[in-house]
Amino acid sequence: MKSHINLRNVVVALVAAGLVLLPLYSQLSGNIFILTLFTRIIIFALAAASLNLIMGYGGMMSFGHAAYLGIGGYAVGILAHEGIGSGFIQWPVALAVSALYALVIGALSLRTRGVYFIMITLAFAQMAYYIASGMSRYGGDDGLTIYKRSTFGGLIDLSNRVQFYYLCLACLFGGIYLIWRIINSRFGMVVQGVRSNEQRMQAIGFHANRYRLVCFVISGTICGLAGALLANNTDFVSPAGMYWTRSGELMVMVVFGGMGSLFGPVIGAIFFLVLEEVLSQFTEYWALIMGPLLLLVVLFARGGIMGLLGRFSRV
Amino acid sequence: MSDPLLRVENLVRRFGGILATDNLSLDVIPGELHAIIGPNGAGKTTLISQLTGQLMPNSGSISFGGRDVTRLPSYKRSRLGLARSFQITSLLPNFTAADNVALAAQAHDGHSFRFWGNARKEKHLRDAAHAALTRVGLGQRIDVPVSELSHGEQRELELAVALATKPQLLLLDEPMAGLGVTESARMVALLKELRKEVTIVLVEHDMEAVFALADRITVLVYGRVIASGDPAAIRSNEEVKRAYLGDQHVVVAHG
Ligand SMILES: Nc1ncnc2c1ncn2[C@@H]1O[C@H](COP(=O)(O)OP(=O)(O)OP(=O)(O)O)[C@@H](O)[C@H]1O
Ligand SMILES: [Mg+2]
């Protein structure tokens, strides 16, 4: 029997507990900033987790994942702008549009592999970026301010910091649970099998691309949810949020945390955004430190932080 | 003679200037073990790959069970009952032996758009994997990751994966390649058992094994069939002797 008590699981449990208790700490210490920071971190963790599903488990290196953050966000922003404030409409629309976008982009880009796949997903995301920039009715380049957060008929008040924080956390935990079920299901086995050896999977009777595509759509939909949360968090959406650098940041979070590790993206998002926060207080050239750090991870810790923790667990 | 299970007609496949399959025609009769032999580079693997759909021919046709499958993608042919093993082992390296076989069983157990239940806990998939692995002699190695299996065990796993798809026609591309003497003997014994249940096309350099197992032998040289017939006829065929059997170096050097 494998023991479930190892360094990695202990860290995961501690981080999860820390996230749950964070509002309490914020309240007691009067540190509101940490609550805002971590709300943002949790949203990005959800986006990174969705990227990890296709990148880590499915072997699909999407370089356009920020597009879903933008699409989910714009769905909320545009509907709010047009006077539809109910989250019961906004959010399902955000998810549906993200899914649809993923379906179209996936169907086109999954014909390719490797570098071409990276390039095509990137190109489509940039296209989404320029389309958003061109929507003059919705702020164009300057973006769109959201004057009122999504309402859920009195069930939950998103303008309340703590309530919103817990909503985001619930979405993150729910998303990770969903991904966990998926990767262990028949579907997940196929997707991971295709990543491992596509030719073999075809030879035993799987239509590889069909499973890939569905995985791509699930991932995009989850990221669309993160987009809806993010728009509510910042009360604002803009094309800049779907720029390719944002997609790159999501990839970096996944790599930092550990590709193909369930909780890795959470660790990666915390690591990346806290580091960014801390470093940017000292220098505006924080990327100069982040870059080499990423290099170190890629060179010496392929499994990211989770991989390192796993290695120490085994001694 | 009964209707062929597999019929190949005038198959042509080029790689640049090379004619790897040169106007090749071939029948496989239900129930037979049909061996395909030929020197290195004769086009044996290229033929198998066209039969199972990893490669598309430039021209010619392939029909399986009376149905034209020439343009069918490999996953569809697998569902019709065509299975292959690869000369160069092609498995899922980061999965266990049982996972590899269970996935093959899963592929033939309805669609896999099931997102919730734990696939590794599905008893009938695990049972099917267990049975196929036991059959090939890997019953004790079920939960071992492929990367930790020996070369010989991986060859056996290749076969178990193919078996788990419950094929009507099994195409084996040098299952004995790289096996030791005892492992080879075990594989021959296994194939002797299997041939009672399933039609087999066997590509093999081990002549002893081929002549011990085959009902019919087709000899390929430069992508062309130079002879086809029962083992006795092949053994005494002058052209075969000249082109292939006489040159023992080719035969021995490969294994
Ligand atoms: N993908 C490819 N691209 C170019 N040439 C190829 C390709 N695959 C095979 N060939 C060529 O086609 C010819 C037939 O190759 P094939 O692998 O089918 O031979 P084989 O009979 O299986 O040989 P062996 O006994 O060594 O396995 C060879 O000349 C080979 O170099
Ligand atoms: Mg070959």
Image: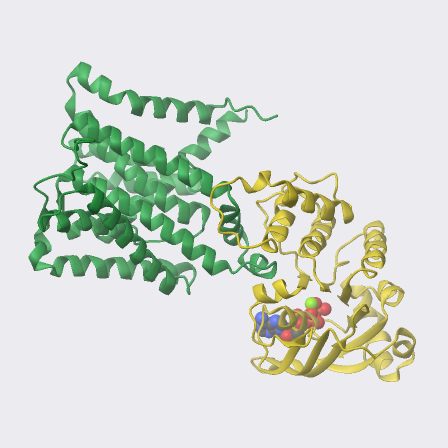
Chain colours: A green, B yellow
Ligand 2 shown in quarter:
bottom right
Q: Is residue A284 visible?
A: no
Quick check: B105 above or below A45? Answer: below
User: Left or right: where does residue A281 sit relative to residue B45?
Assistant: left
User: Left or right: where does residue A186 sit relative to residue B60?
Assistant: left
Q: Which residue is drawn at 18% across and 30% down?
A: A36
Q: Residue at x 73, y 73 (%)?
A: B5
Image quarter hosting the C terminus of chain B:
bottom right
Q: Which residue is drawn at 74% across and 44% down?
A: B138
Residue A113 in which image quadrant: bottom left
**x, y percent for residue A224:** 27, 47
Quick check: A82 above or below B74? Answer: above
**x, y percent for residue A112:** 41, 64
Q: How many labels does the image show?
A: 0
Residue closest to the eye, B175 or A303: B175
**x, y percent for residue A93:** 24, 50
Q: Is residue B51 visible?
A: yes
**x, y percent for residue A38:** 24, 30
